[in-house]
Image (cartoon, coloured by chain):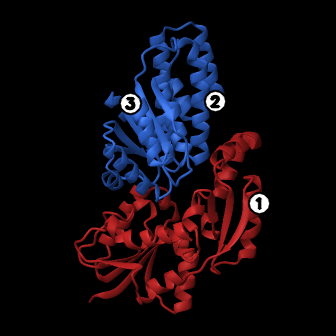
Chain colours: A blue, B red
């Protein structure tokens, strides 16, 4: 029987061997899809620990990157017991690093975590022009649009993008994420929510669908 | 009795501000804020507001920050006036004369001695990854971290001895597989700021008024425009 708390802590501690051993043993027991989803949630809980430790200054950016890789690895182990591909998706999210910014570490971690949470994620990549966000939003009709950035100038690009989305009549929820994002910049941008923590971002998205 | 001016400066540009003070022969009471705070705009805002609140005996507080992470937006002072540079961040402060700064920002990692000395500096990040994950994993991690960067640009503003740090910077560029570039910066903008001989690149915030995005707007917009067409 998988101890979910132990799994959460092992992910939080970035103990790759422990995480893989726990999950491989778990998968060997042929768990139900619901039990597998609980394991995913436990891994996400571990990612929240990673995010907290980063904010407290204990973890480095490299730890966040490793955590993203670890989560992807963990989800891959769980995939065979997570149910069929055609199971209902939680919702569609379009994400991208905004125009003028090339930083995608946080975006990629958010992508892994939101996919693990059952979202269909369309990743537009880096340096994404507002027009591309609009075009893809028209094509895919997403429930949520996520914009990421690290540079201070990203805030202005986010605002441009939100303005373009509104002008095009796109009514998806908008979440912004990244180091320069604050309550004030969220208001300035005109986004619905902001976060500097990928795990928290996924929770916000889950509350919207 | 009221004292006159307090300078609150990001520790990241301590060398550069110290040079500007030396060049202008100006010495205000100065608070050097931890350089680590620039990684967390919310915390930086909180700490700056605390310092502002507890130093209201000054006539004016000069904030030695750009619009770093938008951390200054929302700050206010009850009695002392605030003054700040209309600069995107400390990179723009030191490279304000550089054409096309905006266009190279995304693919360039800028460093100075200050950026290499911090507890969460690139140097520390790399050593931490090597120690924790081993060389192979560390290379993978740093590869992901820097995959969209092309250059490591060392800013020489004369504020520190380049020779003491160039080996470290060059080594980092090699392990991160980035082009190594040394570029000339200067502390003229900082000198103008502390000398109080201000032009449009400095904004004064009256007591009881919050710092807004518009306070940074004009100069940042001008700089962006100039960089686009140059």
Labels 2 and 1 positioned on one and the same chain: no
Asked if labels 2 and 3 touch by Cβ distance under 8 angstroms, the answer is no
Q: Chain of mark 1?
A: B
Q: Position of residue A193 (x, y in %)?
A: 34, 43
Q: Chain of mark 3?
A: A
Q: Position of residue B67 (x, y in %)?
A: 43, 66
Labels 3 and 1 positioned on one and the same chain: no
Q: Chain of mark 2?
A: A
Marks 3/1: CA distance?
47 Å
Observer-nearest of B53 and A162: A162
Which label was assigned to residue A141? 3
Q: Residue at x 51, y 41 (%)?
A: A107
Residue A14 seen in this snapshot: no
Q: Position of residue A35 (x, y in %)?
A: 47, 13
Q: What residue sits right under mark 1 in the picture? A: B171
- Left or right of residue B121: residue A137: left
Please state which of the two labelled residues, at mark 3 or mark 2, is closer to the viewer: 3
Report helix, strand or loop for mark 1. Answer: helix
- The quarter holding residue B140 reads top right
Residue B105 vertical placement versus A76 (above, below): below
């Amino acid at each position: 029987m998988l101890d979910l708390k132990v799994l959460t802590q092992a992910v939080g501690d970035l103990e790759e061997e422990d995480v893989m051993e726990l999950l491989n043993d778990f998968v060997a027991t042929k768990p139900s899809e619901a039990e597998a989803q609980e394991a995913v949630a436990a891994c996400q809980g571990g990612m929240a620990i990673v995010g907290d430790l980063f904010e407290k200054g204990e973890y480095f950016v490299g730890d966040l990157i490793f955590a993203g890789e670890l989560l992807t690895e963990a989800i891959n182990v769980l995939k065979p017991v997570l149910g069929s591909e055609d199971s209902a998706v939680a919702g569609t999210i379009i994400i991208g690093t905004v125009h003028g910014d090339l930083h995608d570490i946080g975006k990629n971690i958010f992508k892994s975590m939101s996919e693990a949470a059952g979202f269909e994620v369309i990743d537009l990549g880096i340096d994404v022009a507002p027009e591309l966000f609009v075009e893809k939003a028209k094509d895919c009709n997403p429930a949520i649009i996520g914009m990421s950035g690290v540079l201070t100038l990203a805030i202005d690009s986010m605002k441009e993008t939100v303005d373009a989305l509104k002008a095009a009549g796109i009514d998806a929820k908008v979440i912004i994420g990244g180091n320069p994002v604050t309550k004030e910049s969220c208001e300035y941008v005109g986004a619905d929510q902001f976060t500097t923590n990928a795990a928290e971002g996924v929770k916000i998205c889950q509350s919207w669908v | 009795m009221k004292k006159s001016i307090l300078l609150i400066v990001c520790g990241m540009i301590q060398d550069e501000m110290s040079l500007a003070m030396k060049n202008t022969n100006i010495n205000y009471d100065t608070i050097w804020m931890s350089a680590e705070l620039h990684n967390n705009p919310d915390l930086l805002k909180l700490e700056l507001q605390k310092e502002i609140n507890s130093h209201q005996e000054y006539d004016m507080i000069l904030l030695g920050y750009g619009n770093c992470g938008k951390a200054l937006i929302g700050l206010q002072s009850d009695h002392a006036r605030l003054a700040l540079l209309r600069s995107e961040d400390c990179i723009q402060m030191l490279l304000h004369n550089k054409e096309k700064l905006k266009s190279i920002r995304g693919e360039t990692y800028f460093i100075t001695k200050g950026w290499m000395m911090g507890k969460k500096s690139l140097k520390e990040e790399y050593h931490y990854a090597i120690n924790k994950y081993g060389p192979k994993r560390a290379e993978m991690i740093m590869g992901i971290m820097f995959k969209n960067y092309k250059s490591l640009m060392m800013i020489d503003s004369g504020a520190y001895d380049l020779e003491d740090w160039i080996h470290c910077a060059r080594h980092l560029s090699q392990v991160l597989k980035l082009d190594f570039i040394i570029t000339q910066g200067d502390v003229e903008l900082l000198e103008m700021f502390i000398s109080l001989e201000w032009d449009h690149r400095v904004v004064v915030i009256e007591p009881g008024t919050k710092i807004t995005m518009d306070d940074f707007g004009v100069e940042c917009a001008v700089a962006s425009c100039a960089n686009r067409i140059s």
